[in-house]
Amino acid sequence: MIDIILAILSTLGALSILFASIGILRMPDFYLRLSVTVKASSLGVGLLLICAAIMFPDDASVTTKAIAIVFFLILTAPIAAHMIGRAAYFIGTPLWKGTVVDELDGMYNKETHELQSDPDKAIDKSTSTFNDQIADNDKETR
Amino acid sequence: MIKNFLMNLLLSFLWVALTGSLSYTGFAFGFILGFFVLWIMNRNEQERRYFFRLPKVFSFAFYFLYQMLKANVQVAYDVITPKYFFRPGVVRYPLSAQSDFEINVLSTLISLTPGTLILDVSEDKKALFIHAMYLKTPEAFIHQLKEGMERRLLEILR
């Protein structure tokens, strides 16, 4: 009985990691790649660790370690995804052409890097000027 | 609230010590037993929230797990079939959560669900900017998130 549960869980975990890696190859833009990879891989690793915990029921140290790893994975993976996504948006990584709506456009204050919450106060409706400004800064530093 | 939780932990440790077997199942059983003992013994009207909140925490955990699996299947189907079904977009999501802790937990949970990714939190903590993969309209997406995830989470945290 336990063998069947283990087989199902570990297959699901491995498949989820496999789909995440295919997703890196197939997704059309950076944000979708990030979106697919982080979650599917954390689910996959979580399922495999649960398998390890079920496999050794008498050994409390294995279970404790598995729980600790899953806990820290859940704690850190979304923060990493958030920071990578924010940095990518900041340097103007283009969104896919099929993107429906972009409400973040022009909400950043370019001097202070502060983010507005009110859409009426949006500063400038294009990301290209932001890239120009970065280019200007590069020239100045040279 | 916190007093009840500590009492419950103490009771489950007592259970483990008295049965003499240090295992997770024994601990969980002791915790459930302690929960019911405390519930029966409770006479303070103000302390009753704990007994309704703990089952809500577990039901939220299962709800979240279900949502996560459902979204994962959807994303996996989209990855392996040749045609793209998604309509991605960046949505501004007005927050009802106020304190730092509530925003932190909410954004972590939203980020863990496949298909949604937090890009940034605004400076005055009034709005989240979410990159969503399956977007019918922004209003429908915001309504779904607000009624499903945020309402349940705030019920537990407040």
Image (cartoon, coloured by chain):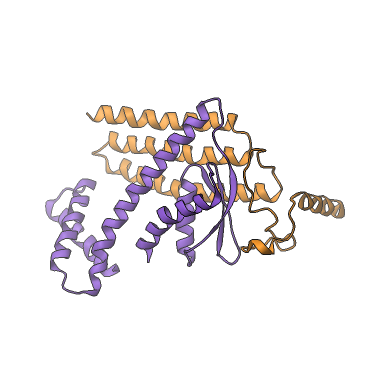
Chain colours: A orange, B purple
Which residue is at the front of the view, A140 or B55? B55
Q: Where is residue A100 in the image (x, y as percent from the top left)?
A: 62, 44
- Exactly how many numbered labels are in the figure? 0
Query: Is B128 placed left or right of B70 in the picture?
Result: right
Query: Is A63 placed left or right of B141 in the picture?
Result: left
Q: Where is residue A11 in the image (x, y as percent from the top left)?
A: 38, 28
Query: Is A74 placed left or right of A106 in the picture?
Result: left
Q: Residue at x 63, y 64 (%)?
A: A118
When the figure is inspected, residue A42 is found, relative to residue A118, above or below; the finding is: above
Query: Is A142 placed left or right of B6 in the picture?
Result: right
Residue A76 visible in this rendered orientation of the protein: no
Q: Where is residue A104 in the image (x, y as percent from the top left)?
A: 64, 54
Which quarter of the rendering shows the N terminus of chain B?
Answer: bottom left
Which quarter of the rendering shows the C terminus of chain B?
Answer: bottom left
Q: Residue at x 84, y 54 (%)?
A: A141
Q: Position of residue A63 (x, y in %)?
A: 31, 42
| Quadrant in which residue B10 is drawn | bottom left
| Quadrant in which residue A7 is drawn | top left
Which residue is at the front of the view, B16 or B143? B143
Residue B155 visible in this rendered orientation of the protein: yes
Q: Residue at x 40, y 39 (%)?
A: B70
Which residue is at the front of the view, A55 or B154? B154
Q: In the displayed image of the protein, which residue is found farthest to the top?
A: B82
When the figure is inspected, residue B94 is found, relative to residue B67, above or below; the finding is: below
When the figure is inspected, residue A73 is found, relative to residue A117, above or below; the finding is: above
When the figure is inspected, residue A113 is found, relative to residue A89, above or below; the finding is: below
